[in-house]
Amino acid sequence: MTPAPTAGGAAAPPAPPRAAGPLPGLGRAAWLAARRLAMLTVLLAAVFAAIELLPGDAANATSERGETAADMAARRAALGLDRPVVERFWDWMTGLPAGDLGTTAHGQPVTSVLAGPFPNTLLLGTLALTASILGALALGSWAALRPGGRTDRTIAVLSTAAFALPEFVLSVALLLVFSLWTGWLPAVTLTGADGTPASWDMLLLPALALAVPQIGWNTRIVRGALADQAALPHVRAAVLDGLPRHRILTHHMLPGALPAIAVSTATSAGMLLGGAVVVETLFNYPGIGAVLSGAIADRDTPLVAGVVAATGAAISILLLLADLVRERVLRERP
Amino acid sequence: MTVETSSPLRPRRIRRAPKTVRAPGAPPAPKRRGRRSHALVRALPALLLTALALTGPLWAPHRVDEPVTAPYAAPDGAAALGGDQLGRDVLSRLLHGGAPLIATALAVAVLVTGAATVIGILAVLRPRLGRWVERAADLAILLPAVLGIMLIGLAWPAGGRLPVAAAATVLGIPYAVRVVAAAAAPVAASGYVEAAAVGGERLWYLMVREVLPNLRATVLALFGLRFVEGVYVVSVAAFLQLGPQPPEADWALMIRENAPGIMLNPWAVGAPCLAIGLLAVSVNLAADALAPARTTPETAL
């Protein structure tokens, strides 16, 4: 198999010591982690630069009617916006590893604003991601068992249709069917005293609305990766040897398809977190969606930048895991 | 895994083998024509729906900002799909609300596909640029489109639809370039392009006359996919109240505005929902039909 080369792998001048030293696997993992970290740093720098270059800042975004120029200057000073760009960038970046995401336009630490809702979104996202991985693996494998058959074609059309649907369209459809017309599931999420959803069935509809498009997308990836595997000589040999179909699928095709599936899962996580903002608004779910919606109304750029940083970090971790899966598969079958 | 060349074939395969031998070379031509007309048929719903949405304002019975019935009134003679949160005609707003969304998404799709085609082919012909393109795509994965658009829409609040379209274009290009580059790589490596390059043809000639004609299917399918992505991003932004502002009629904005009255008049939310859903799904299926067929021969299990 020929793995698609990613960014720095081939291009970066300091070639990684692949099999040197007592712990070659660990050295390689550290190299991959450093690369992902570098990518994340570049992204955060780009985000900071974009905020700087575009008109408007947190001070005039939250300004009130009739505020004088002196009041504005005082607020800028209070928010630390009067300091040089380089200094503020350095402060923001060095604060990130310690969990300090900066200050919102209202003067609260971003971290404390996100501390309550972020775990709820993480719970919802994890649920949807698990459902989409399992669903995609099942549907993709089912389609791959009979290439070109009726099941294969039906799953192809359904998954293509599913990944085109915006999450909020799906949310409204689910709300209409499962909540308003049949009354089986609650339409809004009620929040308990501890800030988490009051009961588990309130998670079902939002998670479903998030998972369905990703199931569609990942099914296509799984199906494509399995088709690439099925064209290889070792699978043909296994078929000619008369091995059972399920064994060929699980032992000869899926292992080779794993790197592509892992990368697509990591990409899905990003789309899930983006979609969560919308779905949470519709279902009144107590996650970062509500916080971000409020941030848009207040034009609170530092808060959005903080969420971008946290999301970028989460996706980077998943991409690193995908890198490690690819490493492992490549080492086993060079 | 050892391959035993002497292992006996199963009877099933032997029976199947003559089928492919019997007709050498005859079927491919009609089959290909069949595939193309099939693709046109599958693209038809998307074209019809787009045409209907773009000409919608011509059919609308009422003005978009004129209350004609009670707020959230059920469908009746005055308003075929009932009233919205201010008693305005849902059907008229529905017919008006598609054109701006589709126009924005089309603009994004044209820009992204055009830029990605040029950069993607360049990246294959000039490998040094290709490595930078790979890095940019790796970077863009880290920023979900919705968050990127929020960021730019917030920092540039007075721009209306422009910041949303600009952000969707910039964030969409890296991934699209990767798709074009992946399709262009085998073409650029083929002998005739190398011969033309060695023969001293200029870069733009290589790009436009040698490589591009072989990427028609890829570029068409990419355009369809970018249009779907454009509809997604622009409508999500509108739903988050970035871009179109009330009292403008916009499908995504209608969903957001009328959601509180979903119990009283489900059509006020359901109709724009259905419109966006049908548009996205039909265009995606059309793009799928136009996409180049998989070339690797798959072993039947």
Image: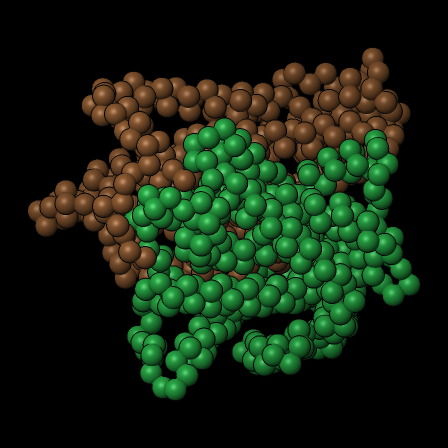
Chain colours: A green, B brown
Please state, as top left, top right, bottom left or bottom right, where the N terminus of chain A lies in the image.
bottom left
On the image, the x and y values in percent for residue B153 come to: 62, 53
Q: Identify the residue shown where x is 51% and y is 44%.
A: A141
Counting from the top left corner in percent of width and height, residue A147 is at 43, 36
Q: Quadrant of residue B278?
A: top right
A50 over B253 or under it: above or below: below
B53 to the left or right of A291 = left
Instruction: Give the side of residue A183 with respect to residue A49, left or right.
Output: right
Residue, x 76% and y 48% (percent of image)?
A204
Residue A181 drawn above or below residue B167:
above
Which residue occupies the foreground of this view, A303 or A250?
A250
Q: Residue at x 65, y 64 (%)?
A: A307
Q: Position of residue B177 (x, y in %)?
A: 39, 49
Tell me which residue sits at (82%, 25%) in the image: B83
Residue at the right extreme, as displayed: A193
Q: Quadrant of the C terminus of chain A?
A: bottom left
Q: Nearer the viewer, residue A112 or B28?
A: B28
